[in-house]
Image (cartoon, helix red, strand yellow):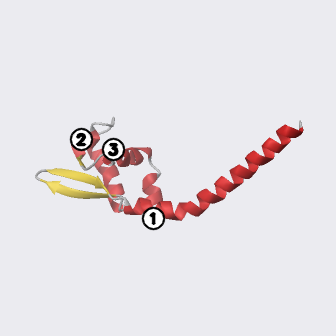
Amino acid sequence: MDVFAALANPTRRELLGLLLRGPRPVQSLAEHFDMSRPSVSEHLRVLKDAGLVAEARRGRERHYQLEPEPLQELRDWLTPYERFWRERLSALSDLLDEEEEEE
């Protein structure tokens, strides 16, 4: 599964946010959502398939933790585009300032 596709869903993004605080069992994660535990597990599976989380069994529980490498790769890929838009928006701001001064 593609990282972009995994991140497209707001529930999966929220799960990643929860995992920023450290590894957690499925039950602890599921408590934050108004959906069944199997539904949360399905979202976690998508994140796992995308390499965004790792799963470890501890007794009968499955614990998940954030795997930041794909996010770092995504950040590296997006950086040139961020610079592009920052420069464009800065140029637009300058143009609007010039027009305001002329009025």
**Secondary structure under badge 2?**
helix
Question: Horizontal placement of 20 versus 96: left or right?
Answer: left
Task: Give the residue furthest to the front.
Answer: 101
Disc 2 vs disc 3: which is toward the camera?
Answer: 3
Q: Residue at x 83, y 44 (%)?
A: 98
Q: Earlier in the sequence, mark 2 or mark 3?
A: 3
Instruction: Name the amino acid type tagged 2.
Output: Ser
Name which quarter of the figure residue 72 lies in. Answer: bottom left
Instruction: Name the amino acid type tagged 1.
Output: Glu
Are the residues at dot 1 and dot 2 in contact (C-beta closer than 8 Å)?
no
- Which of the image's four quarters has the C terminus? top right
Q: Identify the residue position indicated by label 2 in the image.
A: 28
Are the residues at dot 2 and dot 3 in contact (C-beta closer than 8 Å)?
no
**Secondary structure under badge 3?**
helix
Tell me where residue 9 appears, x and y as whole percent: 44, 48
Tell me where residue 96 appears, x and y as whole percent: 79, 43
Q: Is residue 2 in sight in this rendering?
A: no
Instruction: Name the amino acid type tagged 3.
Output: Leu
Q: Identify the residue position indicated by label 3 in the image.
A: 18
Q: Identify the residue position indicated by label 1 in the image.
A: 73
